[in-house]
Image (cartoon, rainbow, N blue to C red):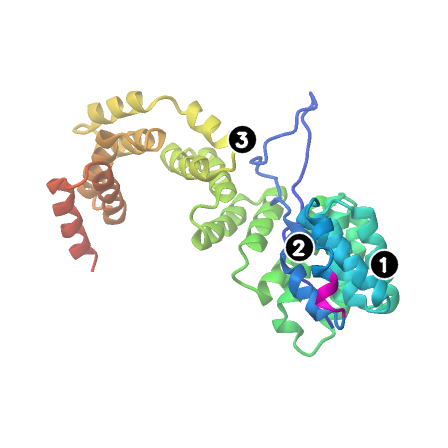
Amino acid sequence: MKHARAATPPASKKDSADGEQLSPFEPQTLPVDRGIRIAIISVVAAIALVGGYLAWSVWGNQQLAITQSPAARAVANLAAIVKKTPGVAGARVKLAEAMVANDQLDDAIVQLKAALEIEKDNAAALTDLGLIAMQRREWKLAESYWLKLVDILGATEMASKDAALADVYYYLGTTYVEEERYEDAVANLKKSLSIKRDSSPAHYMLATAYQRLNLPDMQEQELQIVVAFDPKQAQANYDLGLLSLAKGDKAQAAEYFRVSADNAPEGVTKPMDELAKLGTASVHLASAQRLRTSDPEAALVEARIAAALDPASAPAVKLVAELAEQQKDTKRALNAWERYLELVPGDKTATDAIQRLSANAK
């Protein structure tokens, strides 16, 4: 039996009152779908795997296909294979995946259902149908496919270690989030993570479910796991920034928003919008310098905000390094000195500090 493949579910698309789509960095947003469109990459291998069709038939169509897109050529080639071997479920699944890559969703569904007529428990076909249903936001239909796959894959001997089953629980949990069945989402996402503990997408989706259940501490715990796996994950850093703001920790929020802004997809402005709300780097740096003697702890907060607002500000980064070292925050101080050395290459104060702090950290 062919197992389900890892993919990411479609993004949530909630609209604002004026009809403008909200930013994909709203905290309730789900990860963006790459889905089964990536299957086009494996089409060449699929031609060999589905069995028996002569490779020259593909080559022989090259001159005709040269004006077509790669996806369209794949559809044409795989359609020829299906015509030659109509009773092979795997061939129909590969054709369907090429059709998805070519934006032929209705045609893909026809092929996937035909594959299920040949093999009623074909996990690949059921997975692709579930992903298409999610892409179309047909959540109840998607749920039905995931539940069927849970029954099929959960009955196998190695179910407790089956990465494909972990993916299905992840898809089901995501579907339940969209259906606003958050407790069910949590239960299924935990099942996914019990099999595949290092799944960053599942941890993020669990954080989303906890956010919807108004459990910020548990949301934060899951987001911290996400950034432990991927420190530059823009969405998780953005959400952590919002949580830090809610707790009144503006310096930490600014640092999370900076990481998010530096790694956000083109056109996503939410992290920069949040940074802009904190004011200007020059004002915070001036405040930090003013407070340096009288209140070094408050000065460090101001310096951290200034450095997050303007990462290229050598004075702000240096002040963070000096104040953090003064307060025996070795890790923060070391990171800041390393950043400062990048801004001012060869600076002896920075190299000495890095050597000193590195030795103390051992």
Q: Tell me where residue 215 appears, x and y as whole percent.
A: 57, 45
Q: Tell me where residue 97 appears, x and y as whole percent.
A: 73, 55
First in sequence: mark 3 vs mark 2: 2
Gap between marks 1 and 3 measured at Cα: 38 Å
**Mark 3 lies on residue:** 267
Q: Is residue 276 above or below residue 249?
A: above
First in sequence: mark 1 vs mark 3: 1
Q: Can you see residue 146?
A: no
Gap between marks 3 and 2 measured at Cα: 27 Å
Q: Is residue 344 or residue 229 the one in the foreground? A: 344
Residue 176's label in the rendered image is none
Would residue 350 be found to the left or right of residue 302 on screen?
left
Q: Element type at marker 1?
A: helix
Q: Which residues are magenta?
A: 53-57
Quarter containing the N terminus: bottom right
**Mark 1 lies on residue:** 113
**Mark 2 lies on residue:** 40
Circles 1 and 3, Cβ within 8 Å, touching? The answer is: no
Q: Is residue 113 above or below residue 138?
A: below
Mark 3 neighbour density, 10 Å: few (under 14) some (14–19) many (20 or more): few
First in sequence: mark 1 vs mark 2: 2
Judged by depth in the image, the label closer to the viewer, 3 or 2, is 2
Circles 1 and 2, Cβ within 8 Å, touching? The answer is: no
Q: Residue furthest right?
A: 117
Gap between marks 1 and 2 measured at Cα: 20 Å
Would residue 121 be found to the left or right of residue 195 on screen?
right
Type of amino acid under label 2:
Ile
Q: Is residue 199 or residue 85 the one in the foreground? A: 85
